[in-house]
Image: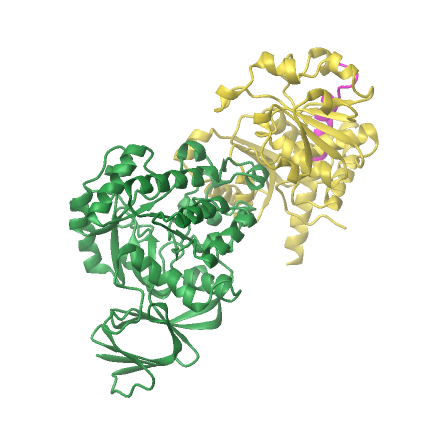
Amino acid sequence: MKILIKSGRIVDPQNNLDEVCDILVENSRISKVARNIRNGADETIDATDKIVLPGIVDMHVHLREPGREDKETIASGTLAALAGGVTSLLAMPNTSPAMDSPENIQLLKNIIKNSAKADVFIAGAITRAREGKELAEIGRLRRAGAIAITDDGASVDADKLMLEALKRAKAEKLAVICHSEDKKLSAGGAVNLGLTSTRLGLRGISKESEYKRIERDINLAQRAQASIHIAHVSCKESVEIISRAKKKGIRVTCETAPHYFSLSEEAVAGFDTNAKMNPPLRAKIDVGAVKAGLKDGTIDAIASDHAPHTENEKEIEFERAEFGVIGLETELAVAITELVQTGILDWNSLVEKISLNPARILGLKKGTLSVGQDADIIVVSPEKEWVVKKEELLSKSKNSPFLGRTLKGVVEYTLCNGKVAYKK
Amino acid sequence: MTWTRKDLLGLEELSKEELEIILSTAESFKEVSTREIKKVPALRGKTVVNLFYEPSTRTRVSFEVAAKRLSADVINIATETSSVKKGETLIDTGKNIQALKADIIVMRHNYSGAAAMLARHLDISMVNAGDGWHEHPTQALLDIFTLKEKLGRISGLKVSIVGDIAHSRVARSNIWGLAKLGAQVTVCAPAMLIPPAIEEMGARVTTDIDEALKNADAVNVLRMQFERDEKAAFPTQLEYFKNFGITRERLAKAKKEIVVMHPGPINRGIEMSSEVADGANSVILEQVTNGIAVRMAVLFLVAQARENAVGSS
């Protein structure tokens, strides 16, 4: 099977490529990138006036299976991923059971094998049952198939335990992803602490609860001489702390999510539970700092933190509603609309944030369009507008903060491992 | 300008003109309660459901009296929060009440935003009778109505709100309403009971009670609840009274005609001394009387707005 993608503008920062040419895909891999490829392809995709990018590597996704198949499944989540241009994703371990043992990871691998429509990589838990009390068998998790460890949704409170986890992960060459939150400071909070919490009469989540824990996690990584990745950076102070650490040569990387550079805490006004997530939407100054951090390279990656929840868990009193929003199907368009169209990132840097850097952080051979590479390719109409509609979302859950928003950038084709896995 | 909202969820979203419509409507309804037959047929044939998820006597009774003086039929539902957690969702409860062909739900709820959330899912009118720490619009309206009745105006008045501002829906609604009508609001409390960024809502902040009383035209004293989860950091009742309690000695240093308000029920000897509660400056019982007129106005306006909306569509 040969697929020829013709005359698209190809953006591939790994190969310093940004020009109009063709890509030939043969048997699941990229076999040629050149101008005017003349080859008897079985299928030709006309990419004239379109942009051709490496498939998105989303390093922060909650697929909910096993355990909460009513929210999302591997099948529905990966279908939504493909529609959003995501060809590889890292599944977070806060499933039920948690991915804290080789047996559980094996169970997940079987489900993935049978039902995943995109490449799903597995993050194991740092501690047993993600309780922060006892380390999981990190070496065995890696051998079972985990490529990273995280207790996402929770932070490992005990310094000693976290330090040990960082050392072991380093020995196992596993990425460590930190949900940096001091729950002693954030407990009971539902929105950003400040004018929003005061106006709405809700308990607030302070920025300190985030950045103080980031500071600690970075210090521990320095002590362990290990690398560390900070998830979902949401505020100015966090960006500043990470920037300083990078300048000191500490091996820290970080990600933010589309909602943190596109929405401020004002989106919560009217008690919209689809704007409730953790960390919460912050002040405008923080949104600006996240954008600046993306531009200056402090923030390495954009990941969706796709967190599906059913309507029953969202359409209730604000404080009782679950934290989290879906994002697989909107992340590329939100990034194009808010970052590329506004000149904050060029296409090259966008691809670094959504594909190349996440692949590097996770040690995956993904995120580029090099010859010989897995043919994970997306074809995008960069100027085409669309409206986010509940009934058109493929995710099982519909808890998007972007419902009703007009976004720019439509994924026309998604090729995953050489096959057209999604077509608009 | 006419009133077009089918719901009253809070004072934050109201314009100055809308506040004035409620106040002037309340003025015309106040007289009804002085008649021998205290009833007008304005809401005859309408059903008002008081849906209370928090124990409340005075607000619930006030709404009930208001609805009855408008000739509405009133149903009271009191539900313990604990049973809600296990049972029916709020939206389902609301839709059931709507299916009974009720016209207005008056809801008290312990969660902030509950009224706004339910209103989005219902076609019938929703009146917020207090949601969590968020808003208690009719309480603030009756406070403002009483102030205006006493002092003839709101614009330019200096009003101090004293007490647990952080956990008070009454404080929030008063700040919005008073600021929109041109009053200058000061909040006064122990530092831990002043929420962050309250200045951005339009209030000045002090932790000094004498400063709050100095030059104030009115002081609205909030009920203190000492049984909160942050109890460990709370002042004791005695300490609170010594530092923030309104006493005759403190009032002596304030304007002679300062208006003293309290949403009730009063903790005598904690928020204020009995002398002050029963003294010449106190309008606490007039607030209760005015509560009826204000709630009659609100019920009447939301019902009328919904009828007009249905009629025109």
Q: Main secondary structure of the magenta part?
A: helix
Q: Position of residue B100 (x, y in %)?
A: 52, 42
Indicate how the structure is coloured in the image.
by chain
Q: Which chain is yellow?
A: B
The answer to if B192 sits in the magenta stretch is no
Q: Position of residue A208 (x, y in %)?
A: 47, 37
Image height of B80 relative to A71, above or below: above
Rendering quarter of residue A416: bottom left
Q: Colour of chain A?
A: green
Q: Position of residue B112 (x, y in %)?
A: 53, 37
Rendering quarter of residue A47: bottom left
The answer to if B286 sits in the magenta stretch is yes
Image height of A373 relative to A317, above or below: below
Q: At x 80% / y 37%, what residue is drawn?
A: B155
Q: Which residues are magenta?
A: B278-295
Image height of A16 relative to A136, above or below: below
Among all residues in the image, which is located at the extreme front? A248
